[in-house]
C-alpha cells in the first residue's frame, strides 16, 4: 500500500511522470531505482545492438516466429446476439419469479424500500479527512512566453525543462475553407501523415516518423472565444516532438507533407478511410455521452454547430458513406483542395517548447522550415460574408494595456477569431436509434463564456450537482453507469451514459435544477465542489504543455487568475442565482440528444426528431 501511495505522490508532483511501470517489479522485490535509471538501460541496449546488429531480429525470431507455445483464437459475430441475450434474461427472470413464495416477494419489496431510504439519506462525511478551501494557493504561477515571427508567421516560444526534447505545434486556420469541404477536414487530418510524402511511400514515412520523432499528428480544433458565445476560432493543429538532434529531420518530414503529400495512393487511402470509419463507429459505444453532448449543443452556439460537423454523429454518418464509395477519385480531389487552404503559412501560427539552451537553434530550424514551405503561401479571403474577422479578440477592459503594448511594439498578434452575426440559437430534441441495450443522454443549456462573472459559479454548480444530487438519482437509483453535469464552451451540459432509462433521466436533470434553485445544499457541499474544481484547475502541467492554453485559446495567465478569484468568491447565494437565471424553465435555451434502442414513447412525441 505504501509503495502505491509513494508512486501516486510522485506522479502528482510538480511535473507529472508516469511511474506506474515500476510497481510490478517493485512488488516482487525488484529494485525500483534500477528501473528509474533509464539512460543506463538505453546505453546498454545501444552497446548490445552494436555488438550484435541482429539483436532485435534474433529476439523476434526466438519469442515470436519460432515460438511453438501459442494459442490461435478466432471470433465471429452473431447477428441475433442481443435478441438471444434479452430472451435468456427474461426466461431466467421469470423462472426466479415463479420460484418465489409470497413471503419471499414481501421480503424483496421491503428490502427495496430499505435500499431506497438508504440511497435518499444524506451521508455524514465529517469523519473523512479533507482539505480546506483556505489551503489552496490564491495565485497561479506565471508561465513566461516570447512572441516573435518566422518568415512572417507568428511564433510563441516557451522555455521549459523538456529533458532534451523539442515540442512543435502549428495552428492552421479554416477561415478560408469553402463550406462544401468542411465535412472532409477530419478525414484529411487522419490521412495526411499516413499516405507518404516527398520521396517516401507510406511505409517509409511511418518508419522515419518512428525513428526520428515522438509522433506527428494533425487534429481539428474549434476554440470558443472567452468573451462572446457566438465567436470562435477554427483550425487544424499540427503536433510533433523529437530529440534535439533530430530537429532537422522532423521539420524535413513536415516540409514534405506540406509540399508533396501522396494523396493519389488509392488503395492506401481506401484502407485508411475504412479504418477511420470503423474507429468512429466503435467510439459511440465507449463515448456515446460525448456524442450526445456534442449533438445537444449543435444549435446553441456556432462553435457547437461546427463541433457536431467535425466530430459528432454527423461526421460518423458521413464517414460511413465515404467508406461505402467504390470510387475515391472525388475524395482525392477534395483532399488536394483542402491541403491548398490549410497547409498555407499565411494562415498559420506556431508554438515551440524546449530548453533555453536549444531555443535559438530551434528558432533557426523553424525559420528554415518556413522558407521550405513558402511556395504554399497564397492569400485567400474568408468564404462567408457574414463572418467578421478579428486580429485581436475582444477583451475586457483590464486587458487594454496589453493591446496598447502590442500596438506600440508592433508585436504580431496570434489570433484570428470569427463572429457569426446571423446565428440564432434554437431548441432541438434529437433521438438516434442505435443497436444498444442502453442509452446515452445529454441536455445542454446556453449560458455564458469563460470571462463572464457567472462562469465560475456555473462551474461550481455543475460539480456540486453531480456529486450531491445527480449521482444519486442517475446512478444509484436509476441504474446508469454514470452521469452528471459539466460547464464548458458556454454550455451547461447534463449527461448520463450506459443508462437503462431515457426520458426518466431527463426528468432527473430537471429535478436537479429545482434542487439547486431551492438552495438545499450546505456550505460543506460548496467547499467540496470548490476543492473538486480546483483539483482540475491546478492539475500538473507537463513542460511540453506549458503555455498551450494561451496558444490554443488565447486564455492568458491574467485571465486564469481572474477566473481563480471568481471561483474563490462563489457563495450559496450566487449558486442559487445562476441556477434561476440560466437553468430555469423559461430562462434557458437548451438542446437534448439521446442515443439508444428503439423507444416508442419518443417516436410518438412530435417534439422529437428521430434519426
Image (cartoon, rainbow, N blue to C red):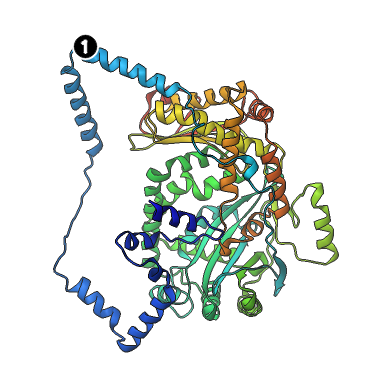
Confirm whether residue 190 shows in the render.
Answer: yes
Residue 505 drawn at (x, y percent): 45, 27
Confirm whether residue 306 shows in the render.
Answer: no
Q: Is residue 566 above or below residue 194?
A: above
Q: Residue furthest top?
A: 102
Q: Is residue 56 above or below residue 552?
A: below
- Residue at 27% over, 17% down: 108
In the figure, is residue 436 to the left or right of 19?
Answer: left
In the figure, is residue 436 to the left or right of 293?
Answer: left
* Residue 244 sits in quarter: bottom right
Secondary element under disc 1, as helix, strand or loop, is helix
In the figure, is residue 39 to the left or right of 31?
Answer: right
Q: Is residue 162 above or below residue 300?
A: below
Which of these two is toward me, 134 or 106? 134
Marker count (numbered)? 1
Q: Where is mark 1, residue-wise? A: 103
Amino acid at each position: 500500500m505504501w509503495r502505491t501511495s509513494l508512486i501516486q505522490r510522485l506522479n502528482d508532483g510538480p511535473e507529472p511522470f508516469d511511474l506506474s511501470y515500476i510497481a510490478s517489479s517493485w512488488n516482487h522485490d525488484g529494485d525500483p531505482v534500477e528501473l528509474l535509471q533509464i539512460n543506463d538501460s538505453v546505453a546498454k541496449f545501444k552497446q548490445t545492438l552494436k555488438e550484435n546488429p541482429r539483436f532485435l531480429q534474433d529476439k523476434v525470431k526466438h519469442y515470436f516466429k519460432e515460438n511453438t507455445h501459442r494459442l490461435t483464437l478466432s471470433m465471429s459475430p452473431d447477428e441475433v446476439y442481443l435478441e438471444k441475450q434479452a430472451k435468456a434474461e427474461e426466461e431466467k427472470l421469470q423462472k426466479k419469479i415463479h420460484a418465489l413464495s409470497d413471503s419471499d416477494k414481501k421480503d424483496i419489496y421491503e428490502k427495496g424500500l430499505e435500499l431506497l431510504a438508504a440511497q435518499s439519506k444524506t451521508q455524514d462525511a465529517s469523519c473523512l479527512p479533507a482539505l480546506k478551501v483556505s489551503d489552496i494557493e490564491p495565485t497561479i504561477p506565471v508561465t513566461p512566453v516570447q512572441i516573435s515571427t518566422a518568415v512572417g508567421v507568428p511564433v510563441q516560444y516557451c522555455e521549459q525543462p523538456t529533458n532534451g526534447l523539442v515540442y512543435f505545434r502549428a495552428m492552421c486556420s479554416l477561415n478560408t475553407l469553402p463550406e462544401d469541404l468542411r465535412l472532409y477536414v477530419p478525414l484529411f487530418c487522419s490521412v495526411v501523415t499516413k499516405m507518404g510524402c516527398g520521396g517516401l511511400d507510406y511505409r517509409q514515412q511511418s518508419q522515419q516518423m518512428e525513428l526520428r520523432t515522438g509522433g506527428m499528428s494533425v487534429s481539428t480544433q474549434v476554440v470558443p472565444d472567452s468573451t462572446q458565445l457566438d465567436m470562435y476560432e477554427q483550425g487544424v493543429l499540427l503536433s510533433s516532438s523529437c530529440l534535439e538532434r533530430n530537429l532537422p529531420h522532423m521539420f524535413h518530414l513536415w516540409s514534405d507533407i506540406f509540399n508533396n503529400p501522396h494523396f493519389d495512393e488509392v488503395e492506401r487511402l481506401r484502407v485508411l478511410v475504412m479504418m477511420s470509419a470503423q474507429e468512429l463507429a466503435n467510439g459511440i459505444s465507449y463515448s456515446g455521452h460525448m456524442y450526445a453532448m456534442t449533438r445537444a449543443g449543435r444549435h446553441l452556439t456556432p462553435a457547437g454547430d461546427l463541433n457536431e460537423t467535425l466530430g459528432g454523429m454527423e461526421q460518423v454518418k458521413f464517414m460511413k458513406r465515404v467508406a461505402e464509395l467504390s470510387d475515391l477519385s472525388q475524395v482525392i480531389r477534395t483532399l488536394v483542395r483542402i491541403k491548398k487552404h490549410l497547409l498555407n503559412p499565411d494562415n498559420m501560427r506556431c508554438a515551440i517548447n524546449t530548453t533555453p539552451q536549444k531555443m535559438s537553434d530551434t528558432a533557426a530550424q523553424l525559420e528554415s522550415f518556413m522558407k521550405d514551405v513558402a511556395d504554399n503561401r497564397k492569400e485567400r479571403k474568408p468564404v462567408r460574408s457574414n463572418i467578421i474577422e478579428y486580429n485581436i479578440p475582444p477583451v475586457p477592459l483590464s486587458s487594454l494595456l496589453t493591446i496598447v503594448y502590442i500596438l506600440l511594439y508592433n508585436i504580431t498578434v496570434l489570433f484570428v477569431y470569427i463572429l457569426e452575426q446571423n446565428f440564432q440559437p434554437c431548441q432541438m430534441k434529437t433521438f438516434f436509434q442505435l443497436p444498444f441495450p442502453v442509452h446515452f443522454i445529454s441536455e445542454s443549456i446556453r449560458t455564458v463564456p469563460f470571462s463572464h462573472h457567472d462562469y465560475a459559479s456555473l462551474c461550481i454548480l455543475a460539480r456540486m450537482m453531480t456529486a450531491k444530487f445527480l449521482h444519486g438519482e442517475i446512478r444509484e437509483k436509476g441504474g446508469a453507469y454514470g452521469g452528471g453535469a459539466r460547464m464548458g464552451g458556454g454550455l451547461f451540459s447534463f449527461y448520463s451514459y450506459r443508462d437503462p432509462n431515457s426520458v426518466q433521466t431527463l426528468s432527473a436533470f430537471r429535478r436537479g435544477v429545482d434542487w439547486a434553485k431551492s438552495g438545499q445544499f450546505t456550505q460543506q457541499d460548496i467547499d467540496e465542489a470548490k476543492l473538486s474544481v480546483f483539483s482540475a484547475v491546478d492539475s500538473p502541467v507537463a513542460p511540453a504543455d506549458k503555455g498551450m492554453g494561451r496558444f490554443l485559446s488565447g486564455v492568458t495567465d491574467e485571465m486564469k487568475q481572474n477566473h481563480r478569484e471568481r471561483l474563490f468568491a462563489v457563495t450559496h447565494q450566487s449558486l442559487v442565482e445562476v441556477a434561476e437565471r440560466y437553468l430555469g424553465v423559461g430562462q434557458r435555451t437548451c438542446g437534448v440528444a439521446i442515443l439508444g434502442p428503439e423507444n416508442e414513447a419518443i417516436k410518438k412525441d412530435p417534439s422529437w426528431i428521430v434519426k
